[in-house]
Amino acid sequence: MAARTEEIVAFLDELLEIDRFADMGPNGLQVPGGETVTSVVTGVSGQLELFERAAAHGAELVIVHHGILWEFEPRRIGAAQAKRLKTLLANGIALAAYHLPLDAHPELGNNALLAAGLGADAVERAFDHKGRPIGAIATFGGDPPGAGAPASDPGPLAGDGIPAAELFARVATLTDRDPLVFDAGPDRVRRLGIVSGSAANDLTTAIELGLDAFMTGEPKEHVMAQARENGIHFIAAGHYATETFGIRRVGELVAERFGVEHRFLDIPNPV
């Protein structure tokens, strides 16, 4: 079944409320393609390998989290960018990108999906970026009083969170990689801040909010001491690894709504 490219992009633009975000590059359509789509490919980052694989699969639309136009990159088209554009244009492939709007979405967003995947009992939006919350706070209720404990041991109180070691194990399972952990927080974690990607500086906000732990993708040199000195767990679970969730779900939603084929193409990045 074929769908119109402009209808898919307009649907995502409205759903993700792209006009409400001050981002580092344009959200929505970045490179035009054909008028209709029968096959959609999603991936985390716009790069030559992804575009070549999308062309091999016969895709007419690629949707990514990290596009190919950024305010911190040269405004001139260099050789690498030219190869990307040539591959897209020669194969009639449109490219759309959704960065902060996809991190922030309360249902499709990376942070909401990470919280759900970790088994949070409640999730609230937090961590403002230029007036818009892009992250989440996941709350873990813990076991009922005495659950699984001997009669002489009342166990943790209800709502007392989960063991920190269990949280770290859940992160490893969900992201399929061992996170870098500075385990400087409490033995049990009730409230976890989550901002996917590169948000180590938001550890300061997590401390101000009194959270037990904070998870992002990448670390920075200063966060080890900052975590230790403030008694909070810091978890770096991988920039790429924390941002596969939203874009995959977007592709699934487009397939469900428009009746097109969808493939998520995994190009793992150790960062």
Image (cartoon, rainbow, N blue to C red):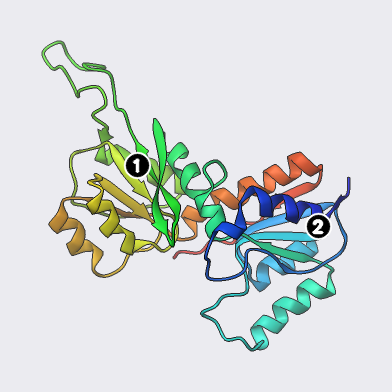
Which residue is identified by label 1? 169
Residue type of the residue flagged with mark 2: Glu
Give the total of numbered labels: 2
Q: Residues within 10 Å of mark 1 (few under 14, many from 20)?
A: some
User: Residue 85: x and y, percent?
Assistant: 74, 77
User: Residue 129: x and y, percent?
Assistant: 43, 60
Q: Are marks 1 and 2 in contact (CB under 8 Å)?
A: no
Nearer the observer, 53 or 247 = 247
Please report the residue visible at 16 percent of the width from the left and 51 percent of the height from the top: 231
Q: CA distance from mark 1 to mark 2?
A: 42 Å
User: Residue 267: x and y, percent?
Assistant: 59, 62
Nearer the observer, 237 or 18 = 18
Q: Quadrant of residue 88?
A: bottom right
Q: Is residue 75 left or right of residue 261?
A: left
Please report the residue visible at 74 percent of the width from the left and 56 percent of the height from the top: 9
Q: Is residue 120 visible?
A: no
Which residue is identified by label 2? 6
